[in-house]
Image (cartoon, rainbow, N blue to C red):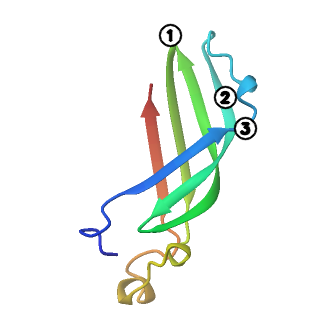
Amino acid sequence: MNSDTYPVFSFSGKIDKLSKINFTKDGVYNVTVNGNMKVRDISKSEKMEVVVTIIGGKIKTSSSFEIELADYGITGTPIDAGKVAKEPKITMSAEF
């Protein structure tokens, strides 16, 4: 996967229906985020379901999703042999 050459995946997106989240009240909100995933030198539109949690004025987010490595030009013997998933599960979390 050339992780020495391409050590970072990046995602930048926006929450659909942001008004659905009350940032002034504790709660848990399931939202959809549309954005752009960049892996290696390939960018692609992606949509993911994200859980936004508001606790004491702090914002926490989490999500799990899969991407197809071939969509980003990632191929090779380990993938073909089944040692690396063709569609790995990615889990993310962030606090603001």
Residue drawn where x is 30% and y is 74% of the image? 2
Marks 1 and 3: which is nearer the front? 3
Q: Residues within 10 Å of mark 3 (few under 14, many from 20)?
A: few
Query: Considering only order in the chain, which callout, 3 or 1, is on the residue closer to the N terminus?
Result: 3
Coordinates of residue 10 in the picture (x, y in percent)? 44, 53
- Is 66 placed left or right of 3 in the picture? right
Which residue is label 1 attached to? 56
Residue contact at pointers 3 and 2, CB within 8 angstroms: no
Q: Residues within 10 Å of mark 2 (few under 14, many from 20)?
A: some
Q: Which three-letter amino acid code belongs to the residue tagged 1?
A: Gly
Q: Which element carries disc 2, helix, strand or loop?
A: strand
- Quarter holding the C terminus? top left
Which residue is label 2 attached to? 29
Residue drawn where x is 60% and y is 35% of the image? 51
Please tell me whether residue 18 is drawn above or below residue 90 in the rendered image.
above
Q: Which three-letter amino acid code belongs to the residue tagged 2?
A: Tyr
- Is 38 placed left or right of 18 in the picture? left
Residue drawn where x is 62% and y is 9% of the image? 24
Coordinates of residue 71 in the picture (x, y in percent)? 56, 74
Distance from disc 1 to disc 3, alpha carbons, whole Å, reads 23 Å
Query: Considering only order in the chain, which callout, 1 or 2, is on the residue closer to the N terminus?
Result: 2
Residue 76 quadrant:
bottom left
- Is 51 placed left or right of 90 in the picture? right
- Quarter holding the N terminus? bottom left
Residue contact at pointers 2 and 1, CB within 8 angstroms: no
Q: Which three-letter amino acid code belongs to the residue tagged 3?
A: Asp
Q: Which element carries disc 3, helix, strand or loop?
A: loop
Distance from disc 2 to disc 1, alpha carbons, whole Å, reads 15 Å
Q: Which element carries disc 1, helix, strand or loop?
A: loop
Which residue is label 3 attached to? 16
